Amino acid sequence: MNTYQVIDEKNWERAMHCMVFRESVEPAFCVTFEADITNFRRKVRARNLSFTLAFVYAVCKCANDIEAFRYRFLDGRVILFDHIDSAFTYLNQDTGLFKVVNVPLRGSIQEYVETAGRIAREQKEYFTGPLGNDVFQCSPMPWITYTHISHTNSGKKDNATPLFDWGKYHEKDGKIVMPVSVQAHHSFVDGIHIGQFADMLQRYLESF
């Protein structure tokens, strides 16, 4: 597990917001937005990188830079991780079933894609165990362009791991665009943070 600090909730500015949303029947909310991947897709292809794994890196790198996405509950306490790693679904082409792969978010995008690809190919199990608290869960769905997405609910209100999804990209007004979804726990993440993530991700995709 990555290092973290325990939050002093008595002196935490967000304590009241956290408590209110923590008691909600459904404390998570999901937002879908459109990302322009024109430049990113071209550069990824030129470098012969897996688009999916490169996008996992981009998403997790940008989310790490926003503090709100690194908060979690642990043993009833609020903690803030210093760093969050990645977990993603990876399709087994032979069976049509996906496996969940955990990869540390380290190094450059080139290094990450190479490492993630090797780990994904070598992993035999579909599930290697419960995911840790210190990951971002990514799940590409490249077969359909969607405007909304929902997720299964474990019923665990303290599950604050953000979920990132993206669908099939398509051409629009001369650009290549793709739906991107973020599901996050409202105790820690508000709409403003989703907006910050969307802006940061777009800047990364354009400057890559």
Image: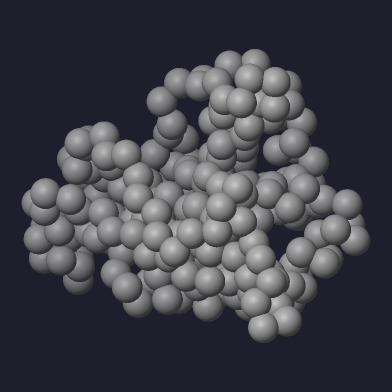
For residue 167, above or below residue 98: below
Name the foreground residue: 204 vs 2. Answer: 204
Picture quadrant where residue 60 is located:
bottom right
Viewer-closest of 161 and 83: 161
Q: Residue at x 63, y 32 (%)?
A: 91
- In the rendered view, does 76 fall on the left or right side of 98? left
Q: Based on the displayed image, in which of its 4 quarters is residue 61 positioned?
A: bottom right
Q: Position of residue 143 (x, y in %)?
A: 60, 48
Residue 205 falls left or right of residue 162: right
Q: How is the image coloured?
A: one colour
Horizontal and vertical percent for residue 42? Answer: 82, 67
Q: Nearer the viewer, residue 119 or 174?
A: 174
Residue 156 x/y as whole percent: 21, 37
User: In the rendered view, does 136 fall on the left or right side of 162?
Assistant: right
* Residue 108 drawn above or below residue 138: below
Residue that sits furthest to the top in the current view? 124
Image quarter in which the C terminus is found: bottom right
Q: Residue at x 62, y 34 (%)?
A: 90
What residue is rendered at 48% in x and 44% in y?
137
Residue at coordinates 17% horizontally, 50% vertically from top-left? Answer: 26
